[in-house]
Image (spheres, rainbow, N blue to C red):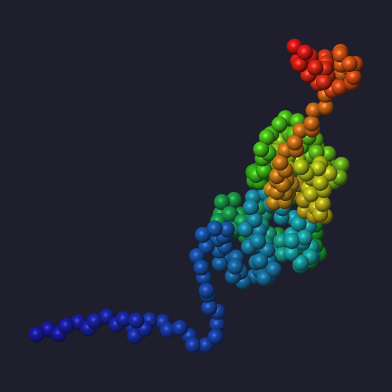
Amino acid sequence: MRPHAPSRTAGDKHPNRRRPRTGGGLVHDNTRHTTRFTVIGNHLAQHSELSLLAIGLGVHLQSLPRGARADIKSLAARFPEGTTRIAAALRELEAHGYLRRVRERVPGGRIVTRTVSCNQPAAAATATGTGTAAAVAVPREPEPMPEPMPAPMPEPQQRAPHQPLPAVPRPAYPAPALLRAAADLLAGLRRHDPRLLLSACDTAHLAPGVAAWLERDVTAAAVRHALTAGLPAEGLRRPAALLAHRLSAQLPPPPPFRPPAAPPPVRLPLQTCDGCERAFRAPSPGRCRDCRTDQEEAA
């Protein structure tokens, strides 16, 4: 009877499995990038002839978007190494084919220098028919880089729409005269604080709230003080929103109920009696009460 073939050795017991070293060394803790990443070849990251500054600068240039500034002054403003060291690192990258400087004539006749960052110098050299050995040597003294082509203007960002203003109280009887007085009060707030210059749209939104205050027997001076007192010294970006909040949060209660006062007694005018010529009060001329009584008894 033929013996069965031995089963495959699993796990770390496999004879050909490479066991990790037990000593110290680099260990990678990697997470897969999904956004905002740049692919860098090991021929640059592990270059045996480039300095660490040149390698880092080459990685930075490959991560920049098209049209970004790559001149010495801009890079020196971004990094602390200074113009001398950055110029030397740029020449290293140029010597090994990771950087090219192409002079071009732009419309208008001006000549500018375009900086080209190469992520694969060998492929670029094959395409242009040149080799990396033909690169210029690194000079000892730093030489200024020609002025680069101006970066394109960034596209204008769309402004986020403003949030609507908070709601304001409404008067019970929005009479046109009451709303006009409220709008005039709001228009005069800028005399107390120039930051309270309101637009016509904001004034129309806030006027009913001011009218609700005036309807509750609050004087115009009291409303003005409630809206302008204690304003922040800085950071008043949306004055209309602050005024709307104060009109709602500090709305006073309605005035106490007062029963209607009794009408004053009617005071009739003085009349002269046609019979005895005495003065008496009556709505129209005629005889007084005594003369009318004597006349009725005689009848």
Where residue 275 sits, quadrant-wise, is: top right
Residue 168, placed above or below residue 6: above
Place residue 14 in its image quadrant: bottom left
Relative to 226, residue 198 above or below:
above
Kindly indicate the quadrant of the structure image that contains residue 50: bottom right
Who is closer to the viewer here, 45 or 231? Answer: 231
Q: Nearer the viewer, residue 189 or 155?
A: 189
In-image side of 258 versus 128 (left or right): right
Where is the N terminus found, in terms of image quarters?
bottom left
Q: Residue at x 52, y 70 (%)?
A: 30
What residue is drawn where x is 69% and y is 51%? 249
Q: Nearer the viewer, residue 14 or 162?
A: 162
Q: Can you give x and y, in whole percent of width and height, for residue 4 in the image?
A: 16, 83
Relative to 62, is 223 on the left or the right? right
Q: Position of residue 66 (x, y in %)?
A: 64, 50
| Residue 97 point in image, percent of width and height | 64, 59
Which residue corresponds to the image point at 72% horizontal and 51% vertical from the top-left? 250
Q: Residue furthest left?
A: 1
Question: How many badges with numbers are in the image?
Answer: 0
Residue lying furthest bottom in this view?
A: 22
Asked whether residue 15 appears in the rendered view, the answer is no
Is any part of residue 288 visible from this angle?
A: yes
**Residue 29, above or below 128:** below
- In the rendered image, the quadrant that contains the C terminus is top right
Residue 195, position in %: x, y? 81, 45
Considering only vertical position in the picture, is 158 above or below 39? above
| Depth order, front residue of 78/179 | 179
Point 78% across, 19% down: residue: 293
